[in-house]
Image: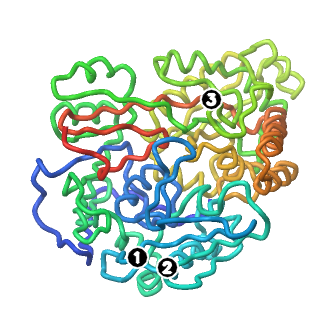
């Protein structure tokens, strides 16, 4: 994918403490009553908010940096942040009026030049950012004055240019002076917190930004403490070592719901989990009949029931049912072992003989990710396909995914915060997208038409065409959306969101 390669974990070496030249110097561990501790399954891969597409990383950098507008608590809702108002001034131009008096944490003033730089940094192929689909419809950025910015496209777009996936805004002067490698560890943003220190894979500590334009936050200190193993996260919460944990396995829900100091909260996620075939690499996965057979061999309802305890929502298409662009009339794969065996025989693998596959999967990133991969592998064995699951640590795994190197099959999740089909198709199926392992000129053509179609009914019809082609060509095993399970200590009051965003500045003491 086009993004900065994440650093690999180095064992046997002391953690590096990053003393950052920001507003708050490094010091003693903050008092517990003014601190909220959050435990995701993985650490941030970088603190450069323009380089990554990983939700746990966005959850960290979203405290340090801000967007012009940000996603609200429901799909299609946007809240003003660094922009106070916006409008379309013609079919191809959007204008944003910026918030005045905002400074970055190093004292630099925030202006339209920073917005222009941030967009152009992502668009510049030298920086190989995974966020290129986010700005693909922006042709250029105009800055009529320090507090006005205009996004200009070459053609009208269905979704406002700054809304499809709003990007974080960085300090242009600081980025130019320090360079990409330095800012990946030394963030300077306009957000409600500033970095105190970061011990990779141990903890990242932030302190409230006293100059934040948004005012006072309820918790003066926010700590992100990654804990990869689910049982260890639960234990840390129950013993007071953390205040919020993600990806709670369903088997812990009763004890956490009834715990003396814990509570369980949940919501339907916009994230879907899928298994992709790397059709760009040689192998049996390049045969459409093999891909179709595997889709018939997989029993998604059984996985949701037995691996997730029913805490998931089966999908019939790469475009989920709660996304704009979904059409229920698009055909879907259903569990059918006889059909799977018939297609395997046509493909030259009667009873699966001679067909051996590796299913690559992360461990600790998604709820029950390794166990889900193992369940799929077991189901493929039922039609004679010898399948080996290869679980991998997340940072190394995602680096391979980003290079389109995981093959022949790999498990991945995808979350589109505005719940629009374009966020799936443009990022994961269009041939030029950094994360796409699929090449179909017709999908490329239809997606471009959908991006520019402003009549909702016509746009939905285009996505129906796309989904129908994807069903026939079967580049994925479509699985499910999660019911996201979180648990918190009773000292914290917080409401989960479908986009999986975790924001300490939205929390209050319980």
Q: Which residue is mark 3?
A: 479
Q: Which residue is mark 2?
A: 147
Quarter of the image holding residue 131?
A: bottom right
Q: Is residue 96 above or below residue 13?
A: below
Mark closer to the chain start, 2 or 3: 2
* Image quarter in which the C terminus is found: top left
430 displayed left or right of 362:
right
Q: Is residue 412 visible?
A: yes
Q: Give the quadrant of the N terminus.
A: bottom right
Q: Residue at x 60, y 42 (%)?
A: 419
- Image coords of residue 155 (percent x, y): 79, 66
In front: label 1 or label 3: 1
Where in the figure is residue 483, as x and y percent of width and height? 48, 28
Residue 305 vs residue 380, the one in the foreground: 305
Q: Are dots 1 and 2 in contact, CB under 8 Å?
A: yes
Q: Looking at the rendered structure, which numbered label has been put on residue 210?
A: none
Q: Give SS at disc 1.
A: loop
Say if residue 287 shows up in the picture: no
Residue 325 on image: x %, y %: 72, 39
> Quick check: 461 above or below 47?
above
Residue linked to disc 1:
100
Vertical placement of residue 262 versus 95, above or below: above
């Amino acid at each position: 994918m086009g993004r900065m390669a994440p650093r690999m974990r180095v064992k046997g070496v002391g953690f590096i403490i990053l003393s950052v030249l920001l507003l708050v110097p490094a010091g003693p561990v903050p008092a517990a009553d003014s601190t909220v501790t959050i435990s995701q399954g993985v650490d941030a891969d970088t603190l450069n908010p323009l380089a990554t597409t990983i939700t746990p990383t966005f959850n960290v950098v979203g405290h340090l940096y801000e967007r012009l507008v940000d996603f609200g608590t429901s799909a299609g809702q946007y809240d003003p942040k660094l922009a106070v108002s916006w409008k379309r001034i013609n079919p191809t131009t959007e204008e944003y009026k910026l918030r005045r008096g905002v400074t970055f944490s190093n004292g630099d003033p925030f202006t339209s030049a920073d917005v222009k730089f941030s967009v152009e940094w992502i668009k510049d192929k030298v920086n190989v950012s995974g966020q290129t689909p986010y700005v693909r419809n922006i042709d250029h950025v105009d800055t009529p004055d320090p507090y006005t910015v205009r996004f200009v496209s070459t053609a009208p777009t269905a979704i406002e240019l700054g809304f499809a996936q709003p990007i974080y805004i960085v300090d242009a002067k600081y980025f130019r002076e320090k360079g990409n490698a330095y800012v990946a560890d030394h963030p300077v943003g306009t957000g409600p917190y500033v970095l105190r220190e970061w011990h990779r894979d141990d903890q990242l500590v932030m302190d409230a930004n006293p100059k934040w334009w948004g005012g006072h936050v309820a918790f003066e200190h926010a700590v992100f403490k990654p804990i990869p193993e689910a049982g260890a996260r639960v234990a840390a919460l129950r013993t007071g070592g953390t205040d919020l944990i993600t990806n709670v396995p369903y088997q812990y829900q009763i004890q956490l719901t009834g715990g003396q100091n814990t509570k369980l909260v949940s919501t339907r996620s916009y994230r879907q989990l899928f298994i992709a075939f790397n059709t760009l690499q040689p192998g049996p996965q390049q045969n459409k009949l093999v891909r179709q057979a595997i889709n018939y061999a997989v029993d998604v309802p059984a996985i949701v029931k037995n691996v997730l305890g029913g805490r998931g929502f089966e999908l019939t298409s790469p475009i989920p049912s709660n996304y704009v662009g979904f059409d229920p009339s698009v055909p879907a794969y259903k569990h059918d072992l006889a059909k799977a065996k018939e297609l395997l025989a046509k493909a030259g693998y009667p009873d699966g003989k001679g067909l051996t596959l590796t299913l690559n999967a992360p461990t600790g990133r998604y709820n029950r990710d390794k166990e889900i991969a193992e369940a799929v592998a077991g189901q493929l064995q039922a039609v004679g396909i010898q399948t080996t699951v290869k679980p991998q640590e997340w940072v190394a795994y995602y680096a391979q995914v980003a290079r389109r190197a995981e093959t022949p099959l790999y498990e991945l999740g995808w979350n589109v915060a505005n719940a629009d089909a374009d966020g799936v198709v443009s990022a994961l199926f269009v041939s030029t997208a950094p994360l796409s392992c699929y090449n179909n000129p017709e999908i490329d053509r239809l997606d471009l038409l959908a991006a520019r179609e402003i009549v909702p009914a016509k746009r939905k019809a285009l996505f129906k065409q796309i989904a129908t082609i994807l069903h026939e060509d079967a580049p994925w095993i479509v699985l499910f959306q999660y019911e996201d399970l979180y648990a918190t200590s009773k000292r914290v009051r917080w409401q989960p969101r479908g986009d999986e965003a975790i924001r300490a500045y939205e929390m209050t003491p319980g």
